Image (tube, rainbow, N blue to C red):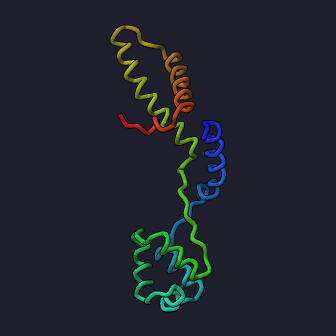
Amino acid sequence: MSPVQARLARKNLDRRLVPLRVEPLIAPPHGWIKAAREALGMTAAQLAHRMGVVQSRVSTLEKAELNGTPSLKTLREAAEAMHCTLVYAIVPTTTFEGILLGQAAKKVDEELTRIHHTMRLENQAMDTRDLAAERERLVADMLAGSLRRLWVDE
C-alpha cells in the first residue's frame, strides 16, 4: 500500500470510529451477556439451550466476561443465540493520525534533545525558532517515510 493510500485508509478508519470515541460504551456491572439476557427476559437455562450448551456454561461465560477472558467466538455465539450482534472494535483514544503525529514528535524530540545537547557543548546551540522549524521538518519527514520506524525502541 502506498503512503497516500495508507493515509487515506487511516483517515477513513478514523472517521468511522468517531461515534465510538465520542461516546464510549461502558459495560453494565454484570456484563453485556447477562444484561442482554435479562433485558430479553431469558433465563440462563434458556440461553444455554439456545446455544446448545449446559446451563453452567452460561454462568461460567457471564463470569468470564467480567474477567475479560471469553473468546470472541463464544461471545458471538451467545449474542447470536439472543438475536444480537457482537460488536468488536479497537478504538484509538484520539485518532490514528494523532497517534502517529504524537509518536513521530516523541521520536524527533528524543533525537533533537541529543543533537542540541551536543551542539550546546560545542557552543553551536540552535535558537528556539531554528529548533522548532527543524522539529517540524523532521516530524514531516518521519511521517512521509516508513511508519514502522516510529515504533522501534532504541
Please, which residue is most extreme toward the top here?
123
- Left or right position of 13 against 44: right
Point out the image quarter for the N terminus.
top right
User: Foreground: 93 or 78?
Assistant: 78
Q: Position of residue 140 (x, y in %)?
A: 56, 28
Among the 4 quarters of the image, the one containing residue 106? top left
- Residue found 40% across the figure and 18% down from its top: 116
For the point 52% across and 16% down, the residue is 130
Q: Residue at x 66, y 42 (%)?
A: 8
**Residue 4 image position (x, y, % from top left):** 64, 37
Instruction: Give the vertical position of 127 relative to 108 (above or below).
Output: above
130 and 55: which one is in front?
Answer: 55
Q: How far across and how far down the image is residue 26, in percent?
A: 52, 66
Which image quadrant: the C terminus? top left
Q: In the rendering, at what x and y percent does residue 103 appear? A: 48, 37
Q: From the viewer's perspective, is 98 left or right of 58?
A: right
Q: Which picture quadrant has residue 3?
A: top right
Q: Is residue 93 above or below residue 49?
A: above
